[in-house]
Image: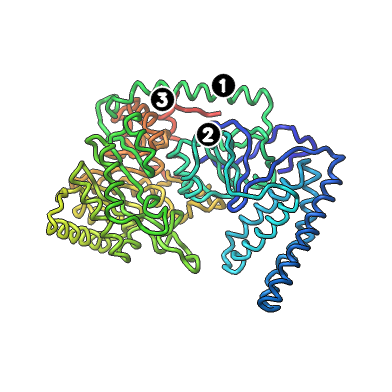
Amino acid sequence: MNLGTDPSAEVRFQGTPVSPGIAIGPVHVSVRGMSAPETHSITPEEVHSEKERFQRALNLTRQQIQEVRDRIGKISGESEGKIFDAHLLFLEDNTLLRRVEKELENRLQNVDSVFYAIIQNYLEAMRRVQDPYLRERTADIEDVSLRVLNCLERREIKDTAPDHQHVLVAFDLTPSDTALMDPDQVLGFCTEMGSTNSHTAILARSLGIPAIVGLERALIEVKMKQTCIIDGYRGELILNPTPETLKKYKSLRRQKDKAYQSLDSVRDLNTQTSDGHEIVLSANIEFIHELKGLKTSGAQGIGLYRTEFFLLEDEEMPDETRQTQVYSEFIEACSGHQAIIRTLDSGGDKLSAEPFSEPEPNPFLGWRGIRVSLSRPDLFKTQLRAILKVSARGKTGVMFPMISGISELRAAKAILEECKLELDRAKVPFDPDIEVGMMIEVPSAAILADVLAPEVDFFSIGTNDLTQYTVAVDRVNHRVADLFRSTNPAVIRLIKNTIKAGQDHGIWTGICGEIASDIRLSPLLVGLGTSELSVGVHQIPIIKSAIRSLNFADCENLAEECLKMHKSGDILAATRNMAKTAYPDLFFET
């Protein structure tokens, strides 16, 4: 999108909403390895002098690189010195130089900021190419770019976030990037990459940060520090909002805040429909700091503790003592309710358990979930022993991810039994009847639910992966994000098949995927017969209020009708209509 000749005009970008809410604040552009230089506006008359300043910086950078090249050549030989030839060639890239000059004229900002925005887009794109050789060249480009920025007489570049509230704009964010965000400073974020069910989006919802993904050319179009609005309901990024637009969104934000404050009245009430059907409403948790929200939200325990961030945040896995200490905090925070701890679930769009010399051709079909744990039994047993130890301190459940068939499930259970024997011999207390469950994320597991049910105490349906594998759509690929629909008739039938198999064998079935926190789908999920919904802490009050507004008999009738439907859109429309009729005040549509 072109911002046009008037840099102060309101401009809107359409992306995909992944975390609801409204954020209003100044833009901060971020890229790994570099933070933005100071940014200020220039007049059209100053464009020429900025171009000259850029050329002087390029000349000085060339001189510096040539000096390094010559020095290395004298010390280690001419071949080693030639590695800097690529650096020099980059500075002669006419396409890049012309783009800087063109954007300088269009954006009317200092050349430091313009060059930085262009380079970060280039770097992030390079990092994602499949060719490992080309990916490695990003370090060269970043090195040259930093030299140019320093030669433009800006401060030394450091990878630090601003110390003021801001809206973050980036090409992409990893789960770790999102996890390290300070919700008090990051009002919301937008990325060019990503999809609704990427792990980054899930984290944004967990942190309660409005977020949009799939904003093409966002980096090259936004200006540092300009005022913007994130509409996390519609997926719009609004730059330079008019006074009328600002007034409208501030009013909507006040409306949302008021409605959410009213939800406090249901915090301590049971999660049950108007005709008395009860459902357990628990929390998805990833970080210790989220535990303080368990009591204030009214959650009935932890339905899913994702352990991968804790386990993989450092270079080495935490030992058994450290794991036991951390898991104990989660058990204690539940105040008598159950805490379900999922064993390491790495791979796919999540953190990897081990670095790869070459990227996996298809990580979602590769080494992930229970496959990692079974191939690393020592690490697996360390985690299982820690979980068993804390089971003596409070109600605990252990859950295995990415089970595709009975052989994997039995192998995991066998290792769990070994851990029980080891602790028993060492006279270490644990709950011998700890509940053992498994994730239903793979179509084969959903189809074989009647075979798997006798082997476990509960099922937990991970609808993000289940949808992905059922409809063959990579849930983090923005090019096919519109095909990722959790209301696909096949997905709904697999959910129903799983719940029924659980009921037939006397075990409960929960849903911990992102559709559990979608108020449009609450009538359908209740009607399908789910026993438990596990959602982000921030979503607990709104989902509880929604369920208390529903009639279970009506929801069952809705589910029966939806199971006969052949189109995702028809199913979504049917459940959304019931939801909007039952609790219109919970919808915040702009």
- Tell me residue 66's x, y (percent): 75, 67
The one of 162 and 16 positioned closer to us in this rendering: 162
How packed is label 2: few (under 14 Cα within 10 Å), some, or many (20 or more)?
many
Q: Which mark is residue 251?
A: 1
Q: Is 380 situated left or right of 490 in this image?
A: left
Which three-letter amino acid code belongs to the residue tagged 3? Tyr
Nearer the camera: disc 1 or disc 2: 1
How packed is label 3: few (under 14 Cα within 10 Å), some, or many (20 or more)?
some
The one of 535 and 272 positioned closer to us in this rendering: 535
Quadrant position of the N terminus in the picture: top right
Which three-letter amino acid code belongs to the residue tagged 2? Tyr
Q: Which quadrant holds residue 292?
A: top left
First-in-chain label (3 vs 2): 2
- Tell me residue 330's x, y (percent): 29, 41
Which residue lies at the image location 23% right of the left edge and 43% below the top edge?
A: 508
Q: Is 314 situated left or right of 18 in this image?
A: left
Quadrant position of the C terminus in the picture: top right
- Is residue 529 something that shows in the picture? no
Nearer the camera: disc 3 or disc 2: 2
First-in-chain label (1 vs 3): 1
Q: Is 48 situated left or right of 589 in this image?
A: right
- Dot 2 corresponds to which residue? 233
Which three-letter amino acid code belongs to the residue tagged 1? Ser
Q: What kind of element bears circle 3?
A: loop
Mark count: 3
Q: CA distance from mark 1 to mark 2?
A: 15 Å
The one of 427 and 217 positioned closer to us in this rendering: 427
- Dot 3 corresponds to which residue? 583
Q: CA distance from mark 1 to mark 3?
A: 20 Å
Which residue lies at the image location 70% right of the left edge and 69% below the top edge?
A: 84
- Is residue 248 something that shows in the picture? yes
